[in-house]
Image: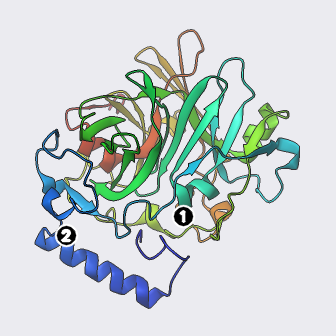
Amino acid sequence: MLGPFYVGGVRSREDTMRFLLLMLVFVTTGAWASPELWRSEWPNTDFNRTNVESWGEILSGGPPKDGIPALSDPNFISVRRGRGLTDREPVITLELAGQTPRAYPIRYLMWHEIVNDQVGGVPVAVSFCPLCNSGITFDRRVQGRVLNFGVSGKLRYSDMVMYDRETESWWQQATAKGIAGVLTGTELTQLPSWMESWDQFKARNPDGLVMAQPKFSRRYGANPYQGYDSSSRPFLYRGENPPHDIHPLARVVRVGGRAWPLTRVREEQGVSEAGLRISWEAGQASALDADSIAEGRDVGTVRVRDGAGMDVPHDVMFAFAFHAFWPEGTWMLGQN
């Protein structure tokens, strides 16, 4: 999965199977379960400062540090010039007050996972972890300085471990918290953003901006994880399955420590509870289904707003990741 597609594009099915077998050996033997093995790659990371209880939770995804190249200061073009994107394919939308709305296509984030950007006076990091379908945006300002984020090449419970280039502390993408290094325990501020279809973004923001295609050689628009979100189990995941017979790769809407199954939100055509209004609208393709992102099955678009109608930070992630990082979280299952 992650490794073969990381550098130089997609390899053959035989290469992929060899890689999966190799990674299975690492998972079952507990290899790479000590920071001592990483010190040569991470000499500036203080592994004595950490809140990771067991280093066996962290595995290599295959590539080295920066093997997936995060983007910084991307170029943007107007919506009207955004050719090449298809109507149903997903983008991460960021609409900050007083700023032109921006769309970050998943076709690019699939291969880069982090975009360091500046929207007005706000430095942001837009992130997408394909293995847990987590697409969230952070404010990059921490303790009076602006951090720049990269991809470490490590996974914890199949979620991307980010790092900042200023202190080389490690950060859990799904929780926005520092997990190793001098910034352990620090939490990034999550900003309201959401995944929707390119067509939905265009219709609401005809004068908006969309991130231009990066100048890398990648199969932009292709999904290197074909069929992943209908798999029986997450790739490289060593944790427990979710409770309540929820499939580990079912999507849930996470707001703080609560999770609403997407099936419930869709079937009820929206949910209003816990001071929130969670809406659902058809039209967005799954990025992790078909070989072409644009051909993925319809998973719909979620928006989360508070009682005043303001957008609320949230995530639409796989159920296994919510259970892994919020084991005491609340499952919003509705009435039986």
Q: Name the residue under label 1.
A: 289
- The residue sitting at the bottom extreme is 14
Left/right placement of residue 148 relative to residue 325 reads right
Left/right placement of residue 132 relative to residue 114 reads left
| Residue at image point 34% right, 65% down | 61
Left/right placement of residue 230 relative to residue 214 reads left
Q: Are marks 1 and 2 in contact (CB under 8 Å)?
A: no
Q: 10 Å neighbourhood of mark 1: few (<14), some, or many (≥20)? A: many
- For residue 315, the mark is none
The C terminus sits in image quarter: top left
Q: Mark 2 points at which residue?
A: 27
Nearest the camera: 271 or 41? 41
Label 1, secondary structure: give it: loop
Q: In this view, does 205 lie above or below 86?
A: above
Q: Residue 167's quadrant in the figure?
A: top left
Residue 63 in percent (x, y) is at 38, 68
Q: In this view, does 181 lie above or below 107?
A: above
Note whether residue 58 is visible. yes
Amino acid, disc 1: Asp
Nearest the camera: 9 or 132? 9
- The residue sitting at the right extreme is 80
Q: In this view, does 115 lie above or below 59?
A: above
Mark 1 or 2 closer to N-term? 2
Q: How far apart are the two marked residues, 1 and 2, measured between alpha carbons?
A: 25 Å
Label 2, secondary structure: give it: helix
Amino acid, disc 2: Val
The N terminus sits in image quarter: bottom left
